Amino acid sequence: MEWQDFRRSDNIEDRRGDDSGGDPQGGISIPSLGGTGHLGLGAIIVLGLISWALGIDPRVLIGGAEMAENARHGGQYSQMSEAPAPQQRAQSQSAMPSDQMGQFVAAVLAETEDVWSSVLPAQKGINYVPPHLVLYSGATYSGCGGAQAAMGPFYCPVDQKVYLDTSFFKDMQERYGGGGDFAYAYVIAHEVGHHIQDQLGILGKVIAAELSAPTRAEANALSVRIELMADCLAGVWAANAQSKFHVIDPGDVDKAILTAQAIGDDRLQQAAQGYVVPDSFTHGTAAQRVQWLNTGLKSGLIDSCNTFSR
């Protein structure tokens, strides 16, 4: 992927090296195993098995799932979005990252801004308001609660920010069999896709539908659809970036597809426990993730990403 000549986004908060962690008052807060929040027993068991297989503290995965669940319940962790301590504010407003990975993320984020600033008004008549992206290491605070690196990248609709510990990219190579600049860009574009859903008013409606779903399986099915739509929107971004700026090199799409396959719910569950539980899927199977990424790549159209109509 040819990214070196991209402009760099100013919408970056670099909190790497911030020792205050996930608590705005300082100190890292990880939920105990006893605080299971809205998670069902089955979800806790699956998360425990996945954490065992990947060598991750289970409290981190369960805490991350609780954070996402609370974000879906109207941002019950919104108290975490209070103003951080003065030292954190200074670090959040630091200068543009100078390291290669920080530069890469700033460049890809700028590319999403340039593409969506054109595509969203043209296709949906909505002006694009870009999200901020927070780079952190280990742990940080967010509008949806404390963030831990093992949660992976995520979008918080409460503060409309993307959170990314770039150690996830190393995990993609070592644990998931994916990697490469375009695969990393796909991950960022997927999270920005959630921001697009937010701007379209889709994310809020799906959250409300999840809350009113009569069973956990039906709520999970809605989560799968919103995640597959974000995969498709990442493809829409890539298609339009290629059309406008010719940024994709031969083989880039193959690497992104390998990544999408590797992080399918069925692949992760099979690796963790030797079998899959479709009712517990939250992001979709490997085949579904590849299908919807390809749908966006081939069409370049937001309307092709309606995962709720199929």
Image (spheres, helix red, strand yellow):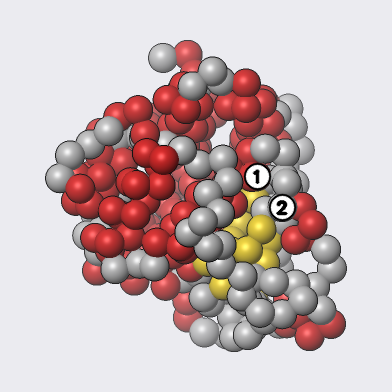
- Tell me if 77 is positioned left or right of 43 in this view: right
Q: Please state which of residues 279 and 307 is positioned toward the viewer in this rendering.
A: 279
Please report the residue visible at 34 percent of the width from the left and 71 percent of the height from the top: 170
- The residue to which callout 1 is attached is 71
Residue that extends furthest to the left in the rendered view of this protein: 274
Q: Nearer the viewer, residue 305 or 135?
A: 135
Q: Residue 206 at what x, y percent from top left?
A: 61, 27
User: Residue 212, how many percent across, how many down?
Assistant: 62, 21
Q: Are marks 2 and 1 in contact (CB under 8 Å)?
A: yes
Residue 83 x %, y %: 84, 68
- Between 268 and 201, the one nearer to me in the picture: 268
- Residue 284 vertical placement versus 66 (above, below): above
Residue at (42%, 52%) from the top-left corner? 186
Residue that carries the numbered disc 2 in the rendered image: 77
Q: What secondary structure is found at the residue carrying circle 1?
A: helix
- Residue at (75%, 72%) from the top-left corner? 24
Q: Is residue 266 shown to the viewer in this render?
A: yes
Image quarter of the N terminus: bottom left
- Image quadrant assignment for residue 162: bottom right
Disc 2 is placed on an element classified as loop
Q: Position of residue 99 (x, y in %)?
A: 52, 84
In the rendered view, does 251 fall on the left or right side of 194?
left
**Residue 264 tag number:** none
Q: Residue furthest top?
A: 309
What's the amino acid at mark 1?
Answer: Ala
Q: Residue at x 47, y 81 (%)?
A: 100
Give the spatial CA distance, label 2 vs label 1: 7 Å
Q: Is residue 28 above or below residue 121?
A: below
